[in-house]
Every structure is written in structure tokens, then in C-alpha cells.
Image: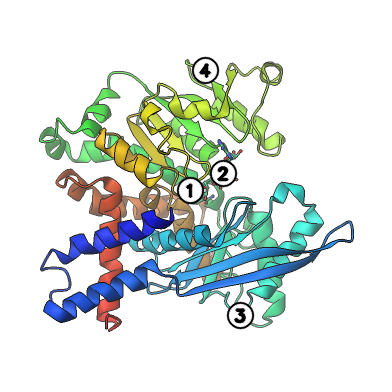
């Protein structure tokens, strides 16, 4: 992902610089200097905070755990981004995820900058008491850099509302008298979280797909009539004749909600034939019982059934298959909602889906992205599709500041309105432009950031 982010930012800037309408006040040498400034600002983080959290384990052993909080850019507002608990977390990964947050917020007009955090642990190997201590120490070590107007973390892989509740409480103890409800988002509803935050990313991911294949087509019949040879348009019209088959990788917060939205959608004919998690793939060519699988995973620490016996006990009809085989199934659509780098150079040639929706961040590597786009596969990119979480985090932040709380239907309406506004600004260009949708979104985000940096006199 490292080079991918730098490359896309540089490509977007080069593309923008070709137009005289972009920063028209700048000519010749000042224009070249502005370009160099923008490359350096947008491809490098403002701060990389690193600590080694000192934790006393239940067995009395004392360990030091590496932890990061990266603050990439705050041009649009306070830094914002999740904290990931995973054993493979490293500085490069956190830096690049922070960059993606800066661009994602710019694309969706969310008044936040980009940040990201990480702790190098497998949370399944720690007791609740130890995890609570790790959360408190994280806030303690980074306390000067965090805050409602400075840097606002949220959950990510391996963290949830429980960790955000603990962290906000610690922040409040360390900073008595300061506003604290907006210091963390993704908290439990009882503790000042927003209704709808848990489902927001998965709903937004599904909405991105539905919008392209249904709403946009309904609203733009003329535009599409002129683009009949476009592979996406062909697939989009195909669904009117038969249900589109869908496979969902990852059945956690994002994947399970996206799968449920697909399962119950009344606008499109979908058939969710496969889902996978860290252990297995479950497959049924007639369509899976998604509500029953969600029910099972809620009662089994987030895991899917792994044996025929467990499936039978729940009366769920499916076969158990190899976990990674899901990616290569003969389906129309793949939702990727697990981890980074899942489709790469070695498996991209075996992908049969014609539409890929990125629920996870960067699940398709740069090489694979290029190969699949050249093959006419439509990739709805992470930056466009998975912003539901940060959009509702923004709503949570507003509600925390106002101490006025919205109803769930208001939250989802505001979420869809915000995402629709982005789709409306990006999609028409996508149909008139040979660039992939991802590049289009990046150009949009980079243009916004560059224009604001220019107006603020930062390009020297
Ligand atoms: P989660 O921890 O709730 O779920 C992750 C799921 O992926 C689990 O079902 C897990 O078993 C599965 N998984 C792990 N390794 C796998 C593998 N190799 N193959 C198949 N499945 C595997 O996490 P989440 O919150 O659903 O996040 C999923 C992805 O979406 C992450 O990349 C995260 O960064 C991204 N994301 C999440 C949010 C959010 O609000 N939760 C927002 C934006 C992006």
C-alpha cells in the first residue's frame, strides 16, 4: 500500500496540473513550486507518534507493546482515524492508512483531517483486564496529541465500542474540565455514541454498490445509453434479467452488515452465495441465510460455523469450503471486507467477478488493481465505498458537542445524503473519462485539499 498511496497522489497532482483551471493564479516557476509543495505535504505525515506501552500482564510479567498514532494532515479539521489492534501493525501501514483518511474525508466533504493508530497485539491473546490497561496506557502515552479539536480516534480492526468507551473515560480523567464527548467516536450509544454507527460502514459499502447499479442508472438513463459498450453498464443492465451472485469476504462489522443489506435489498436482485471469515468460506448456490449466520456469529465471538455439523445444528444450508477460495468463485460481485492486499499479483488472474466493492482499506494491490481495471472489472474503491464509518463518526462528534442526539433514521438519512452528494459529484466524470473510478476519486480529493492549501497560503 505504501507506494500505491504515493503514486496515486502524485498521479492525481500531475493530472490536475495539466489543466489551466487548476490553481489558475499560479504560473511557471510558482506553479512548479506549488506542485512540489503539494507532493511533499500530501505524501508525508505531519507527525508520527510512537510509544512502547508498559503493561503488567495477569501473570505478573511486564511487557512493552509498540503503539502508534500517526497524524497525516489536518488541513480540513482535526485528525481523524481508527485505532487498530493487530499483530501485523507497523509504522508504514499506519502512515498509509492515515493518508487514506485525509483523502477520504476530503472526498466526502467531512471536516476532518487524516490520522490513524495501531497497537501491535493480537487482542484475542489478552484478557479483558489486560486490554483495558492497554487502552488506558494508549491514551496516557498519546494524551497531549489527542482531543475533540485535535485528533479523534475511532475503532478499527480488533477494537470496538468497548475500547472507545474505556479510552474516552481515560481521556476525561487525564483532562478534567475539557470537553470529552467528541474525543473518541464509535463509542457505545449509552456512553454518547451515535445510533447507527455500528452499521454505518457496512450500510455505506452496500449503498455505494446499490447507488451505482440502481439509483444512478435510474437517474441517468441518457448518459448510459451513450455508454452501452462500457463493461460496467453491461453488467448493470444484466441484473435486470437475473439475480447478481455475490460473495462477501470478511463477516465482521463491515462484511456482515453489507451482506445483510444485499440479502434484503428491494432495489436489486441479489443472491449472496458465499461468505468467509478468518476460518472458512460458506457456500450455497441458492443463496445463504444471512440473518441466521449473523445470529450464529453474534453468539460465537464473531466467527462463522466451521463444520457441517454446526451448520446442521442451526438448520443453515451451506457447504464448508477453503477460506481463500471465496475470492476465485464464479460470482458477479465480490465485496472485500476483511484485510489489505487480498487480491494481488498471484491471484488476480483467477478472479471471475466483474464488480469488486472495497469495504476494507486497500484489499486490492496496485498491480492487481491495474490488471483487473484493464480487464474491464469495475472496482468501487475503498475511498468511495467505506466512508460510512467516518461520516457517522462526524455525526457522533456533532451530537457529542451539542449533547443532542439523533434518531437512527435521521442518522441513516444524513449518511445516504452525504454519500449521494459524493457519488453525484464523481460519477458523471467517471463516465466521460477513461480513468478508473479510484483515480477519479483521488483527483477529486486532491483537488479539494490543494485548493484549500493554496487559499491558506501554504504553497511556497
Ligand atoms: P472486524 O474485525 O469486525 O471483521 C473482520 C472480519 O474479517 C472477521 O469476520 C474476520 O474473521 C475476517 N477475516 C480476517 N482475516 C480474514 C481472511 N484472511 N479471509 C477472510 N476473512 C478474514 O473488522 P471490520 O470493522 O469489519 O473491518 C473490516 C475491514 O474494513 C478492515 O480492513 C477495516 O480497516 C475496514 N474498515 C472498517 C471500518 C469500520 O467502521 N469498521 C471503516 C472503514 C474501513
Res. 417 visible in picture:
yes
- Which mark's residue is nearer the viewer, 3 or 2? 3
Mark 4 CB near ligand 1 (8 Å cut): no
Q: In 3D space, how far apart are the residues under numbered discs 3 and 4 (Cα atoms)?
A: 51 Å
> CB of mark 1 within 8 Å of CB of mark 2?
yes
Q: Left of 106 or right of it: where is 216?
A: left
Give the label, 4 or 1, closer to the camera.
Answer: 4
Where is residue 430? Give x, y as percent.
21, 47
CA separation, marks 4 and 2? 22 Å
Quadrant containing the C terminus in the rendered view: bottom left
Q: Residue at x 21, y 40 (%)?
A: 219
Q: CA distance from mark 1 to mark 3?
A: 29 Å
Which mark identifies residue 284? 4
Report the residue marked by disc 1. 201
Mark linked to residue 427 = none
| Residue designated by label 2 | 253
- On the rendered structure, is 122 left or right of 350? right
Query: Residue 425: which quarter of the image?
Result: bottom left
Q: Can residue 398 be seen in the rendering of this structure? A: no
- Mark 3, residue position: 144
* Mark 2 residue CB less than 8 A from any atom of ligand 1: yes
Which SS class for mark 4?
loop
In the rendering, at what x and y percent does residue 319 appear?
58, 17
Question: Looking at the image, is mark 1 or mark 2 earlier in the sequence?
Answer: 1
Q: How many residues crowd around disc 4 within 10 Å: few (fewer than 14), some, or many (20 or more)?
A: some
Seen at 29% across and 72% down, the residue is 38
Question: What is the C-alpha distance between the residues marked 3 and 2?
Answer: 30 Å
Residue 98 place in picture, x, y as percent: 47, 63
Amino acid at each position: 500500500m505504501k507506494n500505491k498511496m504515493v503514486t496515486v497522489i502524485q498521479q492525481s497532482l500531475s493530472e490536475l496540473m495539466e489543466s489551466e483551471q487548476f490553481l489558475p493564479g499560479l504560473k511557471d516557476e510558482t506553479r512548479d513550486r506549488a506542485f512540489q509543495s503539494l507532493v511533499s505535504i500530501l505524501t508525508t505525515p505531519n507527525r508520527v507518534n510512537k510509544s512502547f506501552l508498559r503493561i503488567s500482564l495477569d501473570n505478573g510479567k511486564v511487557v512493552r507493546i509498540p503503539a502508534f498514532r500517526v497524524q497525516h494532515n489536518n488541513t480540513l479539521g482535526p485528525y481523524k482515524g481508527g485505532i487498530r489492534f493487530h499483530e501485523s501493525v507497523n509504522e508504514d501501514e499506519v502512515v498509509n492508512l492515515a493518508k487514506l483518511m485525509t483523502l477520504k474525508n476530503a472526498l466526502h466533504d467531512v471536516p476532518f483531517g487524516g490520522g490513524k493508530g495501531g497497537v501491535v497485539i493480537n487482542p484475542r491473546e489478552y484478557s479483558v483486564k489486560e486490554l483495558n490497561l492497554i487502552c488506558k496506557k494508549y491514551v496516557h502515552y498519546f494524551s497531549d496529541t489527542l482531543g475533540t479539536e485535535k485528533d479523534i480516534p475511532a475503532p478499527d480492526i480488533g477494537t470496538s465500542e468497548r475500547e472507545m468507551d474505556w479510552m474516552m473515560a481515560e481521556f476525561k480523567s487525564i483532562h478534567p474540565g475539557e470537553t470529552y464527548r467528541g474525543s473518541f467516536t464509535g463509542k457505545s450509544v449509552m456512553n454518547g455514541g451515535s445510533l447507527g454507527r455500528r452499521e454505518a460502514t457496512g450500510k455505506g459499502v452496500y449503498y455505494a454498490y446499490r447507488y451505482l447499479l440502481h439509483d444512478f442508472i435510474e437517474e441517468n438513463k441518457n448518459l448510459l445509453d451513450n455508454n452501452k459498450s462500457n463493461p460496467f453498464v453491461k453488467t448493470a443492465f444484466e441484473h435486470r434479467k437475473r439475480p447478481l451472485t455475490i460473495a462477501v469476504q470478511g463477516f465482521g462489522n463491515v462484511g456482515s452488515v453489507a451482506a445483510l443489506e444485499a440479502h434484503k435489498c428491494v432495489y436489486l436482485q441479489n443472491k449472496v452465495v458465499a461468505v468467509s471469515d478468518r476460518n472458512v468460506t460458506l457456500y450455497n448456490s441458492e443463496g445463504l441465510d444471512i440473518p441466521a449466520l449473523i445470529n450464529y456469529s453474534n453468539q460465537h465471538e464473531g466467527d462463522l460455523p466451521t463444520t457441517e455439523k454446526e451448520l446442521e445444528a442451526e438448520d443453515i444450508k451451506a457447504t464448508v469450503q477453503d477460506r481463500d477460495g471465496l475470492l476465485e468463485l464464479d460470482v458477479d460481485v465480490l465485496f472485500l471486507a476483511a484485510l489489505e492486499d487480498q487480491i494481488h499479483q498471484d491471484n488476480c488472474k483467477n478472479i471471475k467477478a466483474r464488480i469488486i466493492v472495497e469495504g476494507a482499506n486497500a484489499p486490492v494491490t496496485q498491480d492487481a488493481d491495474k490488471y483487473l481495471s484493464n480487464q474491464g472489472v469495475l472496482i468501487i474503491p475503498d475511498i468511495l465505498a467505506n466512508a460510512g464509518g467516518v461520516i457517522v463518526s462526524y455525526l457522533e462528534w456533532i451530537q457529542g458537542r451539542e449533547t443532542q442526539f439523533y434518531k437512527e433514521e435521521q442518522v441513516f438519512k444524513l449518511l445516504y445524503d452525504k454519500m449521494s452528494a459524493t457519488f453525484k459529484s464523481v460519477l458523471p466524470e467517471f463516465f466521460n473519462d477513461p480513468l478508473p473510478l479510484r483515480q477519479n476519486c483521488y483527483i477529486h480529493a486532491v483537488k479539494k485539499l490543494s485548493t484549500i492549501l493554496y487559499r491558506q497560503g501554504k504553497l511556497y
